[in-house]
Image: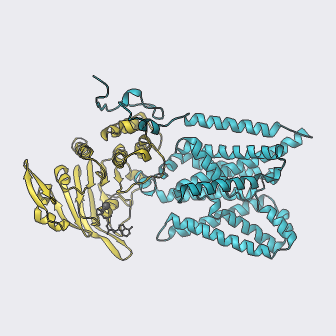
Chain colours: A yellow, B cyan
């Protein structure tokens, strides 16, 4: 379980997040939604100890993520940022192999190679494994980044807009994979997603942010409320029922 | 059934990853593109062996060809020279690669960051206050150690000061290093204007690299520093690979980014300061060695790039010195020529790349 208490993040005298508190239960998928600049990435990087909060604490299974040695944290929690540009010229396979670093410290074992192959297979990257990152399309590169996080094989995975640049096939495929990781391997996945319908379709839990505050927090069924969504996104949203599932419509 | 049907086998654990993938696993490479990206050419190990072999051949040629006069005397002189080259190539080549890895750039080098300027200022101050004869009079291990310590102290203070600030931004650090370097150079230049011509002559000879005048008695100290630094870096070679991914990814993978960065910068300072104190400033040599290493390694892995940078630096110096001594008969000019060529390469690279 990830528990965050009174988290605040300020830049200078501008507070961009918080104070927010809450918890993310173990197992299952939690999605963070909200408009641009709402503080989703900020919250995720604080949870994933990539940035230090101005105040407040984050506990992962009871230990403070900002005080635990980074190496130990890396075996329990993996995080992917929204923007990644690696200057190193590496192939897809080499990138994914970096995900094993917390376990192997750089000396890959047969077990590491299994994890790497599985992650490459999960994201449909088998054919691209030998390519350099700068020879990939945006969506292919995004899948390679996610594969690296999956290869890290942690109980907790935090992904900032993993569906960025993905076509519908790969977006659906990735969500299915994350779903099965949550259901079969009891992983805890926290995502930032912009597509409300994807969030509702695949998540167990949704946290909605706006202007640095949590404005709604609940199951997809609770969140798929036209008035609530309209308020969060400042845009008229209707919710229709299609095949027994709520579907948000916000454009024609 | 044709094998192109997309069967996604959760691939068997392949023991070897560096080799090409098994042919059966790639249904249809789209024309040209898919093959292009694959790593071609000899494996990194073969590349290291080839370059290492070339270094050995060059060293043997340099040591034993064209010996005139006393064999023993010539060999002793040349061995000392090779020793100085080993130190310079190791410190500048390896130091530059590590520096560029942790600062995420391929342009700036420790020498450009103010090391040379500090060295120049120290020499100038000594001549300014004590006259031209002091340089030769004080030469010795003690001076070498003191100069090294002073330069490491300067850069460590600079790094600590910059990293403890609220920004902790590498670009600020680099900029500060360059600006301080320019300030020191200007101060040196100002002081040099006021020197007596004879003192100035003595000084200016010191401000060029002087591989040829390194005393053999200083080499054990230099080797010890290189060995200690090399051991530290070799044990961290996998971490250096991870540092290539940048601060956030490295942190996510469990590195104490700030700690690794500080450690690496201090070790680089030590190596480069020692090399500068021993053989004088060589501003573009590290850049050249590192660039050659990136080109010839065929991988980002420091286990390959670090030894390659050392070998490439050494090869450059050996071939250069051999050429200068036996073909153009200007043996004292090696560092000048390397600086000139290195500077040209540096400019060409900068223009081609167009940005930092
Ligand atoms: N380094 C920074 N300095 C100052 N302000 C920042 C910084 N990083 C983020 N912000 C501000 O913090 C706020 C929240 O940013 P954040 O990246 O968390 O938004 P987000 O919800 O992820 O948005 P998006 O959907 O566009 O990714 C924004 O207003 C942004 O301008
Ligand atoms: Mg964001």
Residues B26 and A10: in front is B26
Give the image quarter of residue B119: bottom right
Splitting the image into four quadrants, where does ligand 2 fall?
Answer: bottom left
Q: Is residue A104 left or right of residue B350?
A: left
Could you tell me residue A200's position as x and y percent? 17, 53
Residues B206 and A54: in front is B206
Q: Quadrant where the N terminus of chain A lies?
A: bottom left
Residue at screen point 48% across, 35% down? B18
Can the viewer see residue A12 in this picture?
yes
Q: How many marks on residues?
A: 0
Give the image quarter of residue A229: bottom left
Q: Residue furthest top?
A: B1
Could you tell me residue A159's position as x and y percent? 31, 53
Give the image quarter of residue B318: top right
Can the viewer see residue B106 in this picture?
no
Residues B104 and A31: in front is B104
Residue at screen point 82% across, 43% down? B327
Could you tell me residue B122's position as x and y percent? 73, 68
Residue at screen point 54% across, 41% down? B298
Q: Is residue B26 left or right of residue B335?
A: left
Q: Quadrant where the C terminus of chain A lies?
A: bottom left
Q: Is residue A222 left or right of residue B280?
A: left
- Compared to A51, does A184 lie above or below? above
Q: Residue furthest front?
A: B31
């Amino acid at each position: 379980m990830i528990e965050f208490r009174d988290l605040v993040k300020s830049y200078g005298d501008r507070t961009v997040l918080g104070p927010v508190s809450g918890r993310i239960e173990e197992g299952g998928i939690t999605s963070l939604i909200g408009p641009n600049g709402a503080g989703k990435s900020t919250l995720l990087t604080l949870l994933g100890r990539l940035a230090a909060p101005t105040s407040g604490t984050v506990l992962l299974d009871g230990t403070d993520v900002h005080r635990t040695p980074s190496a130990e944290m890396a075996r329990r929690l993996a995080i992917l940022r929204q923007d990644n540009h690696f200057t190193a010229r590496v192939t897809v396979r080499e990138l994914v192999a970096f995900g094993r670093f917390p376990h192997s410290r750089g000396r890959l074992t047969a077990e590491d190679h299994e994890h790497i192959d599985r992650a490459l297979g999960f994201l449909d990257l088998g054919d691209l494994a030998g390519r350099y990152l700068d020879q990939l399309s945006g969506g292919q590169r995004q899948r390679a980044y996610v594969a690296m996080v999956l290869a890290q094989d942690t109980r907790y995975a935090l992904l900032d807009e993993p569906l960025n640049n993905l076509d519908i096939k790969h977006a659906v495929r990735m969500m299915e994979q994350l779903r099965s990781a949550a259901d079969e391997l009891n992983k805890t996945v926290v995502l930032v997603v912009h597509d409300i319908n994807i969030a509702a379709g695949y998540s167990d839990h949704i946290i909605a942010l706006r202007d640095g505050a949590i404005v709604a927090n609940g199951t997809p069924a609770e969140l798929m409320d036209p008035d609530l969504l309209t308020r969060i996104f400042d845009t008229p949203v209707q919710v229709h029922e299609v095949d027994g599932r709520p579907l948000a419509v916000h454009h024609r | 059934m044709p094998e192109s049907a997309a069967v996604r086998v959760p691939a068997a654990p392949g023991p070897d990853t560096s080799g090409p993938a098994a042919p059966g696993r790639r249904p249809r490479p789209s024309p040209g593109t898919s093959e292009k990206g694959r790593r071609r050419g000899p494996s990194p190990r073969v590349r290291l062996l080839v370059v290492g072999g070339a270094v050995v051949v060059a060293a043997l040629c340099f040591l034993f060809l064209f010996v005139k006069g006393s064999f023993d005397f010539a060999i002793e002189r040349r061995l000392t020279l090779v020793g100085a080259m080993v130190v310079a190539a190791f410190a500048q080549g390896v130091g530059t690669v590590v520096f560029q890895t942790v600062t995420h750039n391929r342009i700036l080098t420790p020498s450009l960051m103010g090391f040379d300027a500090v060295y120049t200022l120290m020499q100038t101050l000594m001549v300014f206050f004590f006259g031209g004869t002091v340089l030769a009079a004080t030469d010795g291990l003690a001076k070498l150690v003191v100069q090294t310590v002073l330069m490491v102290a300067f850069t460590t203070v600079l790094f600590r000061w910059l990293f403890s600030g609220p920004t902790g931004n590498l670009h600020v650090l680099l900029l500060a290093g360059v600006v301080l370097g320019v300030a020191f150079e200007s101060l040196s230049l100002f002081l040099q204007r006021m020197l007596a011509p004879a003192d100035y002559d003595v000084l200016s000879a010191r401000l060029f690299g002087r591989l040829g005048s390194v005393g053999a008695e200083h080499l054990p100290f230099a080797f010890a520093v290189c060995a200690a630094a090399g051991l530290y870096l070799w044990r961290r070679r996998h971490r250096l690979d991870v540092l290539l991914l940048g601060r956030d990814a490295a942190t996510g993978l469990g590195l104490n980014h700030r700690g690794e960065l500080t450690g690496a910068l201090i070790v680089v300072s030590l190596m480069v300061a020692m090399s500068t104190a021993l053989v004088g400033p060589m501003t573009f040599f590290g850049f050249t060695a590192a660039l050659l290493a990136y080109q010839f390694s065929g991988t980002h892995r420091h286990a390959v790039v670090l030894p390659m940078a050392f070998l490439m630096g050494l090869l450059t110096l050996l071939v250069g010195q051999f050429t200068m001594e036996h073909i153009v008969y200007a043996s004292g000019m090696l560092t000048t020529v390397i600086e000139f060529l290195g500077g040209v390469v540096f400019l060409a690279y900068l223009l081609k790349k167009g940005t930092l």
